[in-house]
Image (cartoon, rainbow, N blue to C red):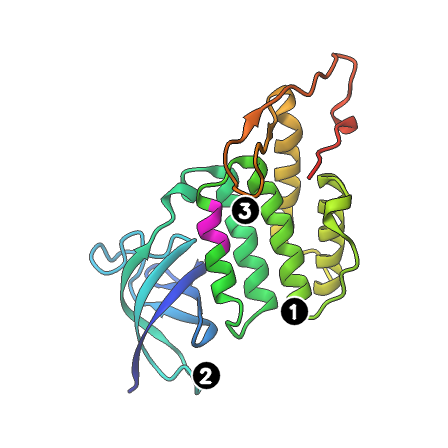
């Protein structure tokens, strides 16, 4: 029986019975792969809060990953738990979108560092930066994986960018993946912010966001708001 250890990103999980957890990982060395955590739902020593995505762990596995056989994760050590993301619902939604899209479009692990960098940046962003980062990342991975993209995001508003990303993902998948609801939730959140919408003071630095008023009258409809990049 082969054993191996690797630093991996927890992408998703699902319960396969009353005791076990099937976890999707992404590794720079092995790409996307699945492993079973035996008794993972009940273990209070080996896997406490270990598989709550996003999360980076040092995993210790049993099985032949190259041979495509069943992989078992024996134990894990949490290296980065991304608490700043998990404590912010909007950032958490964005991270789930990034992980879902990355898992499906890039199975070989060549964008592992890109995903990790995106998650670390997401930790300290304000919400406006978070929205922009999500759309920009989606476009970048679509292009990196060889799909055509001809639109300059800097020339369109957020609603149009979101619509184009949504249409391109549906085109790529051939259907509407479940995680697309996240784009709609974020767009709704943008418009619900109303007069207290956050705009970046210095986008290059990603800091010093300032609140400004949209000066909307009571007669204005939220659909009339154009969110600039």
Looking at the image, is mark 2 or mark 1 earlier in the sequence? Answer: 2
- Residue that carries the numbered disc 1 in the rendered image: 145
> Residue 68, image x and y in percent?
45, 83
Secondary structure beneath dot 3 equals: helix
Q: In whole angstroms, how far apart are the C-alphas of marks 3 and 2?
A: 31 Å
Secondary structure beneath dot 2 equals: loop
Secondary structure beneath dot 1 equals: loop
Q: Range of the magenta residues?
A: 118-122
Q: Is residue 73 magenta?
A: no
Could you tell me if the residues under marks 2 and 1 are in contact, i.e. CB atoms within 8 Å?
no
Quadrant of the rendered structure where residue 56 is?
bottom left
Q: In whole angstroms, how far apart are the C-alphas of marks 2 and 1?
A: 24 Å
Q: Which mark is residue 94?
A: 3
> Residue 28, image x and y in percent?
44, 72
Residue 215 sits above or below residue 52 on the image:
above
- Residue that carries the numbered disc 2 in the rendered image: 68
């Amino acid at each position: 029986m082969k054993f191996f250890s690797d630093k991996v990103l927890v992408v998703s999980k699902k319960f396969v019975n009353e005791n076990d957890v099937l976890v999707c990982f992404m590794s720079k060395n092995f790409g996307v792969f699945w492993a079973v955590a035996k008794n993972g739902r009940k273990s209070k020593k080996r896997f406490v809060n270990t598989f709550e995505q996003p999360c980076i762990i040092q995993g210790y596995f049993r099985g032949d990953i190259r041979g495509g056989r069943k992989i078992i994760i024996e134990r894990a050590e949490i290296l980065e738990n991304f608490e700043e993301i998990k404590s912010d619902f909007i950032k958490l939604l964005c991270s789930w979108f990034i992980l879902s899209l990355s898992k499906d479009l890039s199975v070989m692990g060549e964008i592992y560092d890109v995903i990790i960098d995106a998650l670390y940046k997401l930790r300290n962003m304000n919400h406006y930066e978070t929205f922009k980062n999500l759309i920009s990342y989606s476009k970048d991975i679509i292009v990196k994986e060889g799909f055509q993209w001809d639109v300059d995001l800097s020339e369109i508003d957020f609603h149009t960018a979101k619509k184009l990303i949504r249409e391109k993902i549906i085109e790529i998948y051939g259907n509407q993946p479940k995680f697309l609801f996240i784009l709609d939730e974020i767009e709704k959140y943008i418009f619900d912010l109303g007069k207290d919408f956050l705009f970046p003071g210095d986008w290059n630095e990603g800091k010093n966001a300032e609140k400004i008023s949209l000066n909307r009258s009571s007669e204005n409809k939220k659909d009339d708001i154009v969110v600039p990049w």
